[in-house]
Image (tube, rainbow, N blue to C red):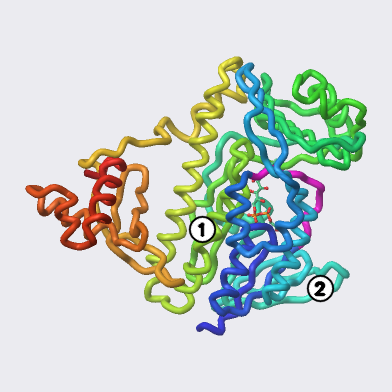
């Protein structure tokens, strides 16, 4: 089974991360990717850069700009406290394909035009960059074609339908920067590259906002941007170039993201609202443990149910966590509560608080799937309201047996109980940590 031919469809951050992870586990991997067809810039934090280093994106990382100033005007207030790093996606994605080749992944640059199930595997039709067509077989499929991935019959949870209109402007070379501003019908994100290219993106509600025909979209965007204070430095001495590009930005979660011989990762499994600015982070997070899931599905089919639960539970948890972060951010904008864009987004996905209180009576131990040495297995973990999937280790210590011991010996101070299992100083530190967490 370890000879299973694995094919990854899509060479964005998620597909690239899984392909490299599988290669590190010793698998032969083929990735089919069509370069991004439009020019987009996206912003990421240092945390994402760390994730990319970990994933092995060496060449792609060299395409990132240095951190630049980010200004936010939300609920009528402006703050300019943080920075972000701008990524020119076409450049970054091309370098990702180079990283993959460097690390021994077979890369086919082309478009997957059809996928069919064949026996116990899959057959793909691929149209390569030079126009040649051929077919490719796989025993295991990793679906990482982002939002463009076909639904393949998988039901989806969707947030309010959103579209992001991207207009490119060109001006003279200037310091890179980015900005966000809310307005009555949505919000705008703006970025300027060092060479003077500017990206002005309006995110709107699909249901309530009637857009003009395509040929009038450019003038329509320009008119709205001229009304936004934050947009002015991006429009000054610049002119729109090319056509407006519309990207769907509705939050979407696939209700199933794992099968016995397939896995969905990144935006193909769940795509978040771009407001969170965490799309790439989320794509990487969903892909991080996917190689262990695939390794288990291939080498230990008897553990398939556990591996699938592990993957799907993590995808779902990530999705709702970022959906609630987005909801709370939308809720902070109170100038237009009755406008459809804002009223739909401040109440979705639910009213559950992002941070749930942790008290000892709400903390338990139980058996959950975990990653161990490149495989999914089951272990006893500590389950809390804000970590429902469980916490297994802390600095190499298995926490659940220690918490169980504290609870069994409730007449003794926690640190005394812990000192029976670990050195006294470590016991004192861990007891304090557990108290801070609200476990004891
Ligand atoms: C409007 C908007 C703004 C955003 N801004 C940000 C931001 O500022 N910061 C941030 O972190 N995230 C942002 N995101 C999210 C980010 O783009 C995604 O979350 C992230 O790229 C997902 O990575 P992925 O690898 O899952 O998919 P993708 O990056 O979409 O990669 C999928 C790849 O598959 C390829 N592909 C598609 N179909 C085929 C096919 N048939 N055959 C072969 N290849 C195919 C595509 O060309 C692409 O290369 C934004 C998203 C939107 C919609």
Is the C-beta of the residue carrying label 2 under 8 Å from the nearest atom of ligand 1? no
From the image, state whether disc 2 or disc 1 is nearer to you.
Answer: 1
Could you tell whether 361 is left or right of 17 in the image?
A: left
Q: Residue drawn 67% across and 62% down?
A: 57
In the rendered view, would you say 417 is above or below 83? below
Instruction: Identify the residue at image location x=54%, y=76%.
Output: 25
Judged from the image, the secondary structure of the residue bearing numbered disc 1 is: loop
Q: Which residues are magenta?
A: 34-44
* Membership of 52 in magenta stretch: no
Q: Is residue 219 left or right of residue 327?
A: right
Name the residue that disc number 2 marks.
133
Q: For marks 2 and 1, give the CA distance.
A: 29 Å
Residue 27 % position (x, y) = 58, 78
Q: Nearer the viewer, residue 117 or 130?
A: 130
The x, y position of residue 226, in whole percent, is 82, 21
Can residue 304 be seen at all in this image of the molecule? no
| Among numbered discs 2 and 1, the one appearing first in the sequence | 2
Asked if residue 226 shows in the view, the reply is: yes
Where is mark 1, residue-wise? 257
Q: Quadrant of the C terminus?
A: top left
State the image coordinates of residue 365 (x, y, percent, origin top left).
24, 54
Q: Are there few (<14), some (14-19), or many (20+) residues within 10 Å of tag 2?
A: some
Helix, strand or loop for the magenta stretch, by majority: loop
Query: Helix, strand or loop at disc 2?
Result: strand
């Amino acid at each position: 089974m370890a000879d299973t031919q694995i094919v990854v469809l899509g060479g964005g951050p998620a597909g690239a991360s899984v392909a490299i992870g599988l290669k590190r586990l010793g698998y032969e991997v083929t990735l089919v990717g069509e370069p991004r067809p439009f020019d987009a810039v996206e912003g990421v934090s240092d945390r994402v850069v760390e994730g990319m280093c970990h994933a092995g994106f060496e060449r792609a990382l060299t395409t990132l700009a240095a951190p630049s100033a980010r200004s936010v005007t939300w609920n009528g207030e402006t703050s300019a406290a943080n920075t972000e790093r701008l990524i020119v996606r076409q450049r970054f994605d091309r370098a990702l394909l180079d990283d993959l080749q460097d690390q021994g992944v077979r890369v086919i640059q082309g478009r997957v035009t059809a996928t069919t199930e064949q026996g116990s595997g899959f057959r793909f039709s691929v149209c390569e960059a030079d126009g040649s067509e051929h077919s490719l077989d796989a025993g295991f499929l990793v679906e990482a074609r982002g939002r463009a991935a076909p639904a393949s019959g998988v039901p989806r949870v969707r947030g309010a339908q959103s579209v992001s209109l991207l207009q490119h402007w060109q001006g003279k070379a200037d310091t890179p920067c980015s900005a966000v501003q809310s307005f009555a019908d949505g919000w705008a994100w703006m970025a300027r590259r060092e060479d003077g290219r500017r990206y002005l993106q309006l995110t709107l509600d699909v249901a309530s906002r009637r857009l003009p025909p395509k040929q009038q979209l450019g003038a329509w965007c320009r008119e709205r941007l001229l009304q936004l204070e934050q947009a002015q430095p991006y429009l000054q001495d610049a002119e729109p170039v090319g056509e407006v590009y519309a990207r769907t930005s509705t939050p979407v979660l696939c209700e199933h993201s794992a099968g016995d011989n397939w896995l969905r990762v990144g935006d193909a499994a769940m795509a978040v609202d771009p407001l969170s600015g965490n799309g790439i982070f989320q794509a990487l997070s969903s892909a991080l443990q996917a190689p262990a899931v695939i390794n288990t599905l291939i080498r230990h089919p008897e553990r398939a149910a556990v591996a699938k639960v592990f993957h799907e539970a993590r995808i779902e948890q990530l999705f709702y966590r970022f959906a609630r972060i987005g909801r709370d951010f939308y809720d902070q904008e109170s100038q237009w509560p009755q406008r459809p864009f804002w009223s739909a987004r401040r109440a979705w996905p639910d009213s559950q608080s992002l941070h749930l209180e942790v008290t000892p009576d709400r903390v338990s131990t139980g058996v959950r799937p975990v990653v161990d040495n490149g495989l999914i297995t089951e272990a006893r973990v500590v389950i809390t309201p804000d970590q429902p999937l469980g916490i297994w280790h802390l600095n190499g210590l298995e926490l659940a047996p220690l918490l169980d011991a504290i609870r069994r010996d409730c007449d003794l101070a926690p640190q005394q109980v812990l000192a029976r299992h670990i050195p006294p100083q470590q016991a004192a530190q861990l007891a304090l940590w557990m108290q801070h967490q609200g476990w004891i």
